[in-house]
Every structure is written in structure tokens, then in C-alpha cells.
Image (cartoon, coloured by chain):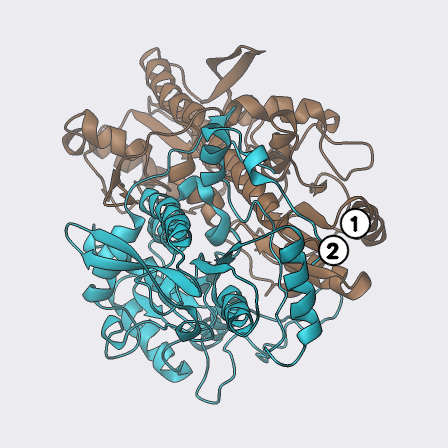
Chain colours: A brown, B cyan
Amino acid sequence: MREDLIDLTAYFDGEKKLELLEHTPAAALGSCRKKLPKVGEDDDFYEKLIAIFRKYDIRYFFYIGGNDSMDTVAKLSEYTRGHDYDMVILGVPKTIDNDLVGTDHTPGFGSAAKYIAVTTQEIIRDCAVYKIPAVTIIEIMGRDAGWLTAASAIGRVVNGIEPDLVYLPERTFDMQAFFADVRAALEKHPNVVIAVSEGLRFADGHYVGEGTQTGAKDAFGHAYLAGTGKALELAVKAEIGCKVRSVELNLPQRCAAHLASKTDLDESVMLGKAAVNAAEEGITRQMMTMQRVSDAPYSIEYWHSDVSEIANKIRTVDDAFINEAGNHVTDACCRYLLPLIAGEAACKYEAGLPVHLIL
Amino acid sequence: MREDLIDLTAYFDGEKKLELLEHTPAAALGSCRKKLPKVGEDDDFYEKLIAIFRKYDIRYFFYIGGNDSMDTVAKLSEYTRGHDYDMVILGVPKTIDNDLVGTDHTPGFGSAAKYIAVTTQEIIRDCAVYKIPAVTIIEIMGRDAGWLTAASAIGRVVNGIEPDLVYLPERTFDMQAFFADVRAALEKHPNVVIAVSEGLRFADGHYVGEGTQTGAKDAFGHAYLAGTGKALELAVKAEIGCKVRSVELNLPQRCAAHLASKTDLDESVMLGKAAVNAAEEGITRQMMTMQRVSDAPYSIEYWHSDVSEIANKIRTVDDAFINEAGNHVTDACCRYLLPLIAGEAACKYEAGLPVHLIL
């Protein structure tokens, strides 16, 4: 809206920068949290937007992101239907949250899942050093969907090493049941490791970590969360009295490009190419998707689906992926996740540090 | 003392397990926090210990660890001096804290420093995505020495990318000076990244993260005990009012073996071998050390030093490594640190997860 445009064709003058871009964390283009008005509520906004598109003859609109971005794609798709401006509008999914419907998974998720799975393995080793009873709580991102938290358990189908307990936001959190679970785990061995989602809620709808929050909300009205692990650490300390600590994986789980999944990076590139191909064929008002053809050998096909059927829906973890007690994931969940973390990114290092692309 | 012995010769039946051990985080042998009595204060203890040594004809004692472990080595060295038991006693340094005197650096430090340096680069990229004023505070381990926190700035001498401000425990922390520093940094660009040591203290000796009166309570009504990063996050939010968040690097900084420094791993193996060679020569009551011969090309010699001169001393960050304002490190500091993070560990992966050795 500020006509702040970048000529990427001029910038990417060869393969080398594109390769670096693959291994650069976060969004090289920057990002925005602009929420588009509902179609029909602010025609001025859309008229200005279309005028800018017209001025630069912008006829292909690719919008990369998660749920909020698909909301933008859906609104623009809806507005342009009733107006005289010919444009291809495509959503290209990219979110570590894996919470978009219509696609087997989302680019970005596999790398975050790999970071979480690997880091959990390392934390379990770290915790195994002492023999005194101790509880370690790992807090993982995912406000509404537990996919990232579930990834902490992937080790089960590789080497049998996984957290003792895993709590997803898809199940109501009950503190007394949690204490009973922790006590039962401590009976089995002294070093108990627990993975929890930042989005855990009690039956009354309150977030477990809410008490430690300021009540701040982002532009989309979502409450900021951060204190679930800390809240549970204090609760276990008070109730059970053993050594307890909490580890919030925090920003590194979404930006640790040095540990990206090769499968995820390859698929991200393929999905981008599929989007360009679809645009050339005149496909519009769709989100690009990935359909799983088979688990073993793992195989994916790229397709697309009506964005209005995708935006503002949340794909939570399947019921079949959560155990009956609601305190762990199932083997089927681990088998779904496993191929997504396969392969290691070939990061370029200079003097011990990864090389990133800065636009 | 429980005669809980492991036959490592039988266990390590080839090179393969040793290679896996190199890439396994934490202490495969386990650890203990047993503090030995002062020599002369509890002869019973030492007599029992020597009796066990005698029973199994244990004549070589290698003790791996940091400051507390060297205290054990020093006490045992002292006790055996006055008693008829012939034994080689050697301390083998291993601590991410890098706070032992008499050695250029300690095995373990380079890998933790690399994790911190790389993760800081990634967090800086993550923070660059938005243009609104935001402060991100990274809390790093090191209660008494700021070596690990200093490692966040290594990027300066590689690609020019580093935190805006770095606070080490070697300098008294002043909240008003800190606010002035943050405001000045926000004048320069919107995304301010700050590295702080967990061990920061005010002039009155209190830790910054201790007993901060934030008034925040968790879901259970407990006062929220903030860490250093969290305390500073709340302070900046209250004083400056911009977007603020804190990231505690926590356990991963000491167990992220997937991102180990090759230099560190190689040196750890070499130092272990040097300890065995020294023992064969009858060197005793010493800690193995590394002496830097040159920075460029980087070169190290292995030596040893009287453990009684090392135990219970803390090597803090050199004055020449901290800037005058006490809010950053110097180029000399970065040049000291740089060779220690060189090279990437060739971790073995299976199905996307690193393979660890479990004894």
C-alpha cells in the first residue's frame, strides 16, 4: 500500500543467492500483520489496492504464509470476483504451525518439527546425567494446534526415546490428572521429561500459562502466550516437591535454519515452482497444497484447493493421533510426522557461522 | 563409593562407539555433585575411598569436569600426598563455562559458544522481519563468568552481525544506564537484540533476575519468579513501552551436540589422549591444559598445571575483552573466541534424528 516494491528478478541474478535464501531463517522479504477489511465494509481500501495493482500492471499475486495470510488471499479473491480486474491470486502455504486444512502439511513445519524432535532427544540425554528425581518440562509453540508439540515424540519410531508425557491443546488440561501422570512417570524412572504446548487450556477455557501473561493481544486479536511451562514448573514444585525446571524452546524452534529438514526445504522449493506453474495455467483463488501419495516410500503430489474453503479454519491434530488418556501421541502420529524431518540441510558455513541471505 | 564400576574397555569394543560418544550430548558416564570433605576433617571418608582404590588396584584417577571437579582432584591430590598409596591423579577440564584458570579455554566451551553464536545470528534474522520497534533479550548461561554471553557477538568479526548490546556479569548492572542504552539502540534501528548473562547483578549484589517485584502471578497465585531475561523484558515494557520479548537459551545451549564445534570435539579427544600420555609418564596432581600458540593460524599445545593452583579460582572475562561502557565486548574478545567455533561436527543421523551413544 506504500508502493514499496522490490525487483526480485534484478536481485536474484543467479542460482547462488537462491541457494543461500533456502538456508536463511525467517522471511527475507519481511512480513506484515495487515488484516484486510471484510469485503463490502471498506471499498476505499480495496479500490486503492486495485489502483496500485493496475498502476504497475500486477497480474499475479502470490501470498506466502499461514492462516492469517490465507484470510487475506480469500478476501482479495472474493473482492476481485465482483470487480473488473483480471488477476491470478494464489496462496502459498508457509507456517511452522501445520494448521492449514486441505494440505497434508505446510512448508516450514518439517524443519521446526525436526528442531523440536532433535532438541528433545538432546534434552533427554542431558537429563539422564543425574539419578535424583527431576521433572523437565519443555514448552513448545502452537496456540491452537499441537503438531509441533507432537513432534517431540518422533523418536519413538526411530530409537524408542521420547518424552514420558506429551500434552496437546486439542485436549482439555486437567491439573489433577497431570499430577497423577507425573507421579506415575516418576515411579518408573527418576528423569521425567514432559512436552507441553503453549496453548494448553483448562476446562474453563483459560490458558494454563495465562496467569503469567500481560493480556496483550496481537493485531489479529490472539492472546500472546508464553508461560505454560513456567506455570506447570511451579505447580509440580508445589505439589510434588521434586527438582523441576522448564525449558521454553521459544524463537529458535521457528528460526533454527541450521537444523532444517532437507525434505522440508526441497518441498518448499517444489511448492513454489508448482505455484508459478499453476499461475501460468490461469489457476486462481486457490491455495497450493501437498497431497500425500504414500508413507513408505514417502511421496507427495502438489495440487491446489479453493482458498475460501481453507481460510479461517484450523487443522488440529487428528483424534487418531492422540492417545486415549490425552497425555501422549500415538504411533500413527509419529509415522505421519517421521518423513517430514528426513534429511539434513546442507547449510553453508563461513568461519563457523552459517551464511544467510540479507536482501 | 558404592563400587558401581563400569568396564569401559569391554564396552568400547571398537572405534564405532567412540565416534558416537563424540557426538553424544551431556555425560555418557553420568555425573555426581559429591563434594569431598576438607582434608583432615573426615579421615574416615578418605580411608574408605583409598580402600576401594586398593581393592580394585585403581592406580590412575582421571576426573572430568569444571571447577567443582577440580576441587575434588585437588583434595584427593592433597590427601594422597601424606598417605602411602601410589596413584596418578589428573584433572581433565570439561565445562561449557570456560571459567577455569591455567588453560586457554575448556573443552565443551567451543561447542556451546558455537550454538550461542549461531542461534544469535538466527534470532537476529527472525527479528528483522518486522519494522515496528521491538526489543529481544537473549538470556545466556554463566553465573560468574560472561564467556558464553560474549560468544553471542562473534558474528562481528565474520559478517558484521551481532547483538546491539551485550551485558556480562563481570560488570555491575545499572538499570538506568541499561534503559539509556536501549533507547539509543532503538534510535538506530527498530529491531534491537540484546544478549544478557543470567548472572547479572546490581551494585547491591542482588541478581537482576532475583526477587524482581513485577507483581505478576501465575495461574495458581504464586508470584512469578522471573529470570534475568524475563525481569529485563518486564522492565523495558514498563519503562519504554515497545514490544519486548525474552528468550532463555536454557538447556539446549549446553546439550545441542548437533551443532558442536569440530575444533572443540577434536581438542577434547586430543586433551583426553594427552591426559593418558601424561599419566603414563607419571605426571600427577595436575590438571591438563591447553596453551594457545597462535591465533592465526590457530594453534594449541597440550600441557598441564598444578591443580592446587587452579581449583576454586574463577577465570572471568578479561578486562581487555569488555568495552569501556560495559555494554559490549571488544574486537579482541571476538578474535579470541572465533577459532573455538570453527568447523561443524559430522553428526550421524538416522531417519532425521542424531544417533547418540547410551551406555
Q: Residue A218, percent across and down?
A: 51, 54
Q: Earlier in the sequence, mark 1 or mark 2?
A: 2
What residue is pinned by disc 2?
A: A133
Q: Which quadrant of the structure image shows residue A86?
A: top left
Instruction: Classify mark 2: helix, strand or loop.
Output: loop
Q: Are marks 1 and 2 in contact (CB under 8 Å)?
A: yes
Q: Amino acid at mark 1?
A: Leu
As rendered, which of B98 and A311 lies closer to the eye? B98
As rendered, which of A192 and A305 lies closer to the eye? A192
Residue occupying image coordinates x 56% and y 64%: B85
Instruction: Classify mark 1: helix, strand or loop.
Output: helix
Alpha carbon separation for disc pair 1 and 2: 7 Å
Residue occupying image coordinates x 58% and y 70%: B226
Q: Which quadrant of the structure image shows residue B301?
A: bottom left
Q: Residue B86, percent across and down?
A: 52, 61
Crowd rating for badge 1 (residues with CA inside 10 Å; few <14, some 14–19, many 20+): some
Vertical placement of residue B226 versus A189, above or below:
below
Vertical placement of residue A66 versus A196, above or below:
above
Q: Amino acid at mark 2?
A: Pro
Q: Which numbered circle lies on residue A186?
A: 1
Image check: A235 left or right of A115?
right
For residue B136, say whether it is visible: no
Q: Residue B98, percent across and down?
A: 39, 63
Crowd rating for badge 2 (residues with CA inside 10 Å; few <14, some 14–19, many 20+): some
As rendered, which of B15 and A183 lies closer to the eye? B15
Q: Chain of mark 2?
A: A
As rendered, which of B262 and B126 lies closer to the eye? B262
Image check: A190 left or right of B200?
right
For residue A189, say whether it is visible: yes
